[in-house]
């Protein structure tokens, strides 16, 4: 058996040859120069696997333990695994004897892990755990795979399969499919923590989304939308839509508001926890206060919500149908518009009006200023002002500049 010491990397592993045909050895062994005892064995078929060779602290004899195959186990992961085992060896534990003496550990399959471990965890930490339940239904191709055998290849096959699925005759969007893969990646991350499995999902990338929304309502369209929304027969739904385009709130955060969150005296609407985990205070303008006072007249006894539902003690669901009817009555093209467009509209209109980015960031409660800038959509008028301003400056400067003389010859 040939023995060589190299710095193991993915590129060098790819280039290493298999044993020649006339070789007596079935494997070529390469030693990692960074971790003593970590070996890479290449078989006749080209398979590559890791071993940790060591002296057993129990038997005082040479021993080895398999770590996994490459590329299922990348070099950094193999080194981490080897270091953990070497700590055991230093403590007088033979990892192979320890493993063989224990009953076989039963690793749950993906479906079992989701239901028994991930979902209970998500319910205590995520407001959107019900969305995870819906997304997991589309993970059926990997349901029965044990979590320790959920390879990058299996996840990529799921990713390809998601691209072929349709709902009511229409293909799912890339963004929707990415949420399913993000769920799988989250499960793998949790499994790595609680089951000590290798997280192969880190090798799978989400598909680039080229669906940035460019549609937003300018100031005139916003004013028209709010005017029509206030005449809608259901005051709760109409005023909700009006407040969305005034505050730039996420619709889920506005729907969940209770009257205890409204401070009329100090003109503040308080959101205890937003998407980024931080509280948010919204200053209430005269128009916002007027809308809220109108809603207070609709207040139901025993229902704490600002936007009460028909069932006792609940708030309304997202009024999509009402939104479409209001847009239609206002004569506003609904193509590309959704409730989240309110945040884009508020950000764009405030920034286009000249408000500084930091102030708009506070209005939208963004942690990162880059998020605020991502929401900005320039109006045609703003772009024209910018182009004309630069042209005017150039023309004015050119009047004071003489052309250089052209030398003959």
Image (tube, rainbow, N blue to C red):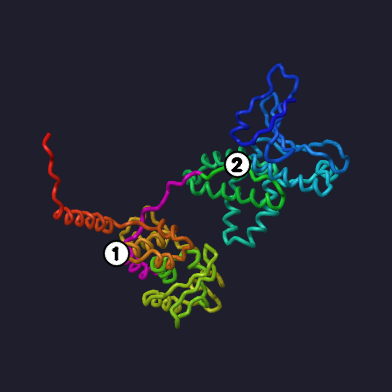
Mark 1 surroundings within 10 Å by alpha-carbon count, few (fewer than 14), some (14 through 19), many (20 or more): few
Q: Disc 1 designates what residue?
A: 220
Secondary structure at numbered mark 1 = helix
- Is residue 59 or residue 358 the one in the foreground? 59
Q: Quadrant of the N terminus?
A: top right
Is residue 224 placed above or below 38 in the rendered structure?
below
Q: Quadrant of the C terminus?
A: top left
Secondary structure at numbered mark 2 = helix
Is residue 32 placed above or below 310 in the rendered structure?
above
In the rendered structure, which segment of residues is drawn in magenta? 207-233
Residue under the image location 13 percent in, 41 percent down:
406
Residue under the image location 14 percent in, 55 percent down:
400
- Is residue 3 or residue 355 the one in the foreground? 3
Q: Which label belongs to residue 155?
A: 2
Q: Is residue 92 left or right of residue 295?
A: right
Q: Residue furthest left?
A: 408
Residue under the image location 67 percent in, 24 percent down:
18
Question: Residue 189's x, y, as percent?
Answer: 64, 50
Q: Residue furthest right?
A: 59
Whether residue 215 is in magenta: the answer is: yes
- Is residue 51 or residue 211 the one in the foreground? 51
Question: Residue 130's x, y, as percent?
Answer: 59, 57
Whether residue 141 is in magenta: the answer is: no
């Amino acid at each position: 058996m040939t023995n060589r010491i190299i710095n193991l990397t993915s590129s060098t592993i790819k280039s290493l040859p298999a044993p020649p045909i006339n070789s007596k050895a079935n494997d070529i062994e390469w030693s990692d120069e960074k971790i003593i005892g970590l070996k890479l064995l290449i078989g006749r078929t080209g398979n590559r696997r890791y071993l940790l060779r060591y002296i057993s602290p129990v038997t005082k004899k040479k021993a080895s333990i398999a770590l996994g195959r490459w590329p299922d186990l990348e070099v950094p992961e193999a080194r981490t695994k080897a270091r953990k085992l070497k700590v055991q060896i230093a403590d007088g534990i033979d990892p192979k004897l320890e493993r063989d003496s224990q009953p076989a550990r039963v690793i749950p399959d993906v479906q079992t892990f989701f239901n028994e471990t991930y979902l209970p965890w998500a319910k205590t930490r995520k407001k959107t755990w019900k969305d995870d339940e819906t997304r997991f239904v589309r993970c059926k191709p990997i349901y029965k795979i044990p979590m320790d055998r959920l390879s990058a290849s299996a996840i990529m096959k799921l990713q390809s399969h998601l691209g072929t699925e349709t709902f009511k005759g229409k293909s799912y969007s890339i963004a929707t499919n990415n949420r399913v893969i993000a769920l799988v990646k989250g499960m793998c991350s949790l499994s790595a923590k609680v089951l000590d499995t290798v997280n192969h999902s880190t090798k799978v990338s989400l598909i680039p989304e080229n669906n940035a929304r460019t549609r937003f309502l300018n100031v005139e369209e916003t004013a028209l939308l709010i005017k029509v929304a206030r005449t809608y027969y259901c005051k709760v739904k109409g005023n909700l839509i009006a407040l969305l385009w005034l505050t730039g709130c996420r619709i889920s955060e506005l729907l969940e508001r209770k009257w205890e969150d409204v401070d009329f005296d100090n003109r503040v609407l308080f959101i205890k926890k937003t998407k980024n985990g931080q509280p948010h205070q919204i200053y209430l303008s005269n128009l916002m206060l007027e809308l809220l006072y109108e809603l207070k007249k609709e207040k139901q006894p025993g229902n704490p919500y600002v936007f009460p539902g028909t069932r006792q003690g609940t708030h309304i669901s997202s009024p999509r149908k009402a939104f479409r009817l209001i847009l239609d009555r206002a004569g506003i093209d609904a193509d590309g518009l959704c409730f989240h467009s309110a945040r884009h509209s508020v950000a764009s209109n405030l920034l286009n009006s000249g408000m500084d980015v930091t102030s708009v960031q506070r209005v939208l409660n963004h942690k990162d200023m880059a998020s605020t800038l991502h929401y900005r959509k320039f109006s045609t008028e703003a772009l024209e002002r910018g182009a004309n301003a630069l042209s005017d400056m150039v023309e004015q400067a050119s009047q004071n500049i003489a052309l250089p003389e052209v030398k003959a010859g």
